[in-house]
């Protein structure tokens, strides 16, 4: 764990979209990575009444200290994959935080997004299709999130992708890693 001058390290994330877009996996990968880095984590999923196609979001807290509450209302980063998720969570980004949105499905026009946060447009569906499957749009967003924040380290996140996704379906690991790198490239 890096020494941050005695200051407490705590980072928070909200990831939201429709069920089936892989946002729970994105949140889990961040939580697993934070845990592998020796930090305390919480991951709190929330589903709408429908599993696929209904609303889905999760909150992640990563901290050097015990996590007091898994509920996140003032997030360092918010990742949204759909317009309704943007409308619901855009004001949950703390001042100076980052809003990462899937520009293939989300339009910021008319949404009155605050000027005190950073916004990053990610054509996640387009990049995922070019990578080989629409199903890796969440991993594209993960790459952007890791590159845009200090939530978790890039190298450890890659190890978690290999461990958690590569062991279950090894044939898809190269595509997942390519999607992750493409997401990081958005920030550079």
Image (tube, grey):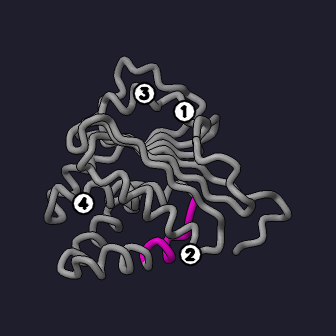
Reading the chain from its start, which is encountered first: label 4 or label 3?
Answer: 3
Reading the chain from its start, which is encountered first: label 1 or label 2?
Answer: 2
Estimate how packed mark 3 is, as few (under 14), some (14 to 19) or many (20 or more) residues with alpha carbons within 10 Å.
few
**Mark 1 → mark 4, Cα distance in angstroms:** 25 Å
| Residue 51 pos. (x, y %) | 25, 43
**Mark 1 → mark 3, Cα distance in angstroms:** 8 Å
Contact? badges 1 and 3 (CB < 8 Å): no
Residue annotated with mark 3: 88
Residue annotated with mark 1: 92
Read off the magenta span.
Answer: 151-158
| Point 58% across, 41% down: residue | 72
Residue annotated with mark 2: 36
Residue annotated with mark 4: 136
Q: Quadrant of residue 15?
A: top left
Judge whether 188 appears above or below 97 on screen.
below
Which element carries disc 2, helix, strand or loop? helix
Q: Looking at the image, is mark 4 or mark 3 nearer the viewer?
A: 3
- Magenta stretch, main secondary structure class: helix
Which element carries disc 3, helix, strand or loop? helix
Estimate how packed mark 2 is, as few (under 14), some (14 to 19) or many (20 or more) residues with alpha carbons within 10 Å.
some
Contact? badges 4 and 3 (CB < 8 Å): no
Q: Quadrant of residue 131?
A: bottom left
Estimate how packed mark 1 is, as few (under 14), some (14 to 19) or many (20 or more) residues with alpha carbons within 10 Å.
some
| Point 22% across, 72% down: residue | 175
Which element carries disc 1, helix, strand or loop? helix
Q: Looking at the image, is mark 2 or mark 4 nearer the viewer?
A: 2
| Point 58% across, 42% down: residue | 71
**Mark 4 → mark 3, Cα distance in angstroms:** 24 Å
Reading the chain from its start, which is encountered first: label 1 or label 4?
Answer: 1
User: As drawn, is 67 to the left or to the right of 58?
Assistant: right
């Amino acid at each position: 764990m890096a020494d941050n001058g005695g200051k407490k390290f705590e980072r928070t994330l909200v990831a939201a979209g429709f069920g089936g877009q892989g946002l729970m996996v994105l949140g889990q990968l961040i939580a697993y990575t934070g845990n592998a880095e020796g930090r305390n984590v919480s991951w709190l999923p929330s589903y709408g009444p429908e599993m696929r196609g209904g609303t889905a979001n999760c909150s992640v807290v990563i901290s050097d200290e015990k996590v007091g509450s898994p509920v996140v209302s003032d997030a360092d980063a918010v990742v949204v994959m759909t317009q309704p998720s943007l409308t619901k969570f855009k004001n949950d980004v703390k001042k100076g935080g980052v809003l990462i949105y899937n520009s293939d499905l989300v339009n910021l026009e008319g949404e009155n997004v605050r000027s005190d946060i950073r916004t990053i447009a990610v054509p996640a569906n387009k990049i995922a299709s070019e990578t080989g499957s629409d199903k890796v749009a969440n991993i594209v967003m993960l790459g952007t999130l890791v590159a845009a924040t200090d939530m978790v380290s890039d190298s450890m996140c890659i190890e978690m992708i290999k461990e958690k996704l590569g062991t279950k379906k090894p044939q898809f690991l190269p595509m997942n890693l390519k999607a992750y790198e493409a997401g990081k490239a958005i920030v550079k």
